[in-house]
DNA sequence: CGCTTTTGATGACAAATGTCAAATACTTTT
DNA sequence: AAAAGTATTTGACATTTGTCATCAAAAGCG
């Protein structure tokens, strides 16, 4: 379960009249007061310590999360090995989009790679906003376009032929993550072993 | 340039009162008559022979295309090698989404892998629909969610550790493409060499 | 139909990457 | 500061995949 502890309560009060989510949404479209109030009422902050898992199986598919502070990775278990499929930071929204293409096929996990502060966005809220506020669909559509592009970049990145070239592309595409994420996770994201990444870096 | 030849004209007449695009959109949300008319007026069919390129540099970023018939691949040139990043078939919409994350960095091409029939969707039309019809944003948002999932699947697929496992995943995720796409392109999509794919298949 | 081009399969070998083990460097905790 | 736990590097070697050459099969074409 997602636990709301004391410091979360404080943050909740702090954010009460203006969830950081509002600022993100407003980058895409103006919002009226009614929708802002609704968002403020139905989102809440949560925090996780470094290395903790953000979604327990129980809460899977109940929330999306805006990252207010910190870095989060998403990964899928393929037998014993973990495959990191994305790494996200501040002002990005993460979480499993529902209606998985191949449901039940492989489970996705989210893990905090730093102490993180998140805003939880219940899927029930998204549903309500999409149903009742046309502008929510504008915001959602524009954000999905951006997330689609970033997923395409990830799909391209891992098809680059050599470990070295993939790493170089990573440096260009995600320059800010290099110093925040351990090489272990970067290697997993690049679909190479830690030792190979270490050698690629030594050579450069 | 996109050329509209005689048979395209015929198809245009045939589709005049109901672009196949309408049917696709209606799977996501009802459309009123006004928007239907607008779509019918501003989309048009085009066709390409097998192996032809669908977007010339001149027309890059001017259209999306609904695939009515056939298979299309998208690829990016990485030096001399082509990297196939997706393969799409009937009822999917393809084309470069504007506002590339890293613009000018790498060029994306579209190629017909069978004789294809497409409906061209000018970006100007998308813009107009999003501006003037709230339901267009509902349709767009829902479609982008689906395309996002499929991009995530592609990003996951190519991170699977061995050629054989990637191929097996491909068989499960894209069963209908096996018999329509040459192994050359499947190998490129799986980020392995044709010879490797050939050996993986021989072993199975 | 015969010719040419493309596609796919296979062998021999090279190069890249993975695996395992150990050493070193960093962080965190006590 | 010492101890314990991670993170990263490095070496030796195994395995996978790529490369190049060749051949056969299939598809396209006059």
Image (cartoon, coloured by chain):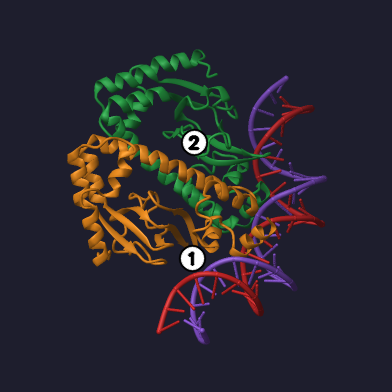
Chain colours: A green, B orange, C purple, D red
- Quadrant containing the C terminus of chain B is bottom right
Q: Residue B157 at x, y = what percent?
A: 55, 47
- Please give the residue where the numbered disc 1 appears in the rendered image: B79
Left or right for A176, reference B163 = left
- Quadrant containing the N terminus of chain B is bottom left
Q: Quadrant of residue A42?
A: top left
Query: Between tags 1 and 2, which lies in front?
Result: 2
| Residue ID at (35%, 62%) | B54
Above or below, B98 against A34 in this view is below
**Is residue B42 shown to the viewer in this render?**
yes
| Residue ID at (29%, 64%) | B58
Chain of the residue where label 1 is placed in the rendered structure: B
Chain of the residue where label 2 is placed in the rendered structure: A
Q: Residue A150 at x, y = what percent?
A: 44, 45
Q: Secondary structure at mark 1?
A: loop
Q: Residue A189 at x, y = what percent?
A: 57, 45
Left or right for B68, reference A114 = left
| Residue ID at (57%, 25%) | A57
Q: Give me the disc on residue A100.
A: 2
Which of B103/D9 is in front? B103
């Amino acid at each position: 379960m997602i636990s709301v502890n004391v410091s979360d309560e404080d943050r909740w009060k702090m954010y009460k009249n203006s969830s950081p989510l509002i600022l993100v949404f407003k980058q895409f479209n103006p919002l009226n007061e009614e929708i802002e109030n609704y968002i403020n009422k139905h989102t809440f902050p949560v925090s996780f310590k470094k290395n903790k898992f953000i979604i327990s199986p129980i809460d899977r598919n109940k929330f999306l999360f805006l990252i207010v502070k910190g870095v989060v990775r998403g990964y899928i278990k393929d037998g014993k090995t973990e495959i990191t499929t994305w790494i996200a930071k501040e002002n990005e929204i993460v979480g499993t989009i529902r209606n998985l293409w191949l449901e039940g096929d492989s489970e996705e996990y989210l893990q905090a790679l730093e102490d993180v502060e998140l805003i939880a966005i219940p899927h029930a809220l998204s549903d309500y906003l999409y149903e009742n506020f046309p502008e929510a669909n504008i915001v959602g559509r524009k954000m999905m376009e951006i997330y689609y592009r970033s997923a395409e970049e990830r799909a391209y990145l891992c098809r680059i032929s050599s470990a070295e070239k993939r790493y170089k592309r990573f440096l260009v595409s995600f320059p800010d993550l290099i110093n925040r994420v351990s090489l272990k996770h970067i290697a997993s994201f690049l679909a190479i072993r830690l030792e190979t990444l270490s050698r690629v870096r030594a050579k450069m």
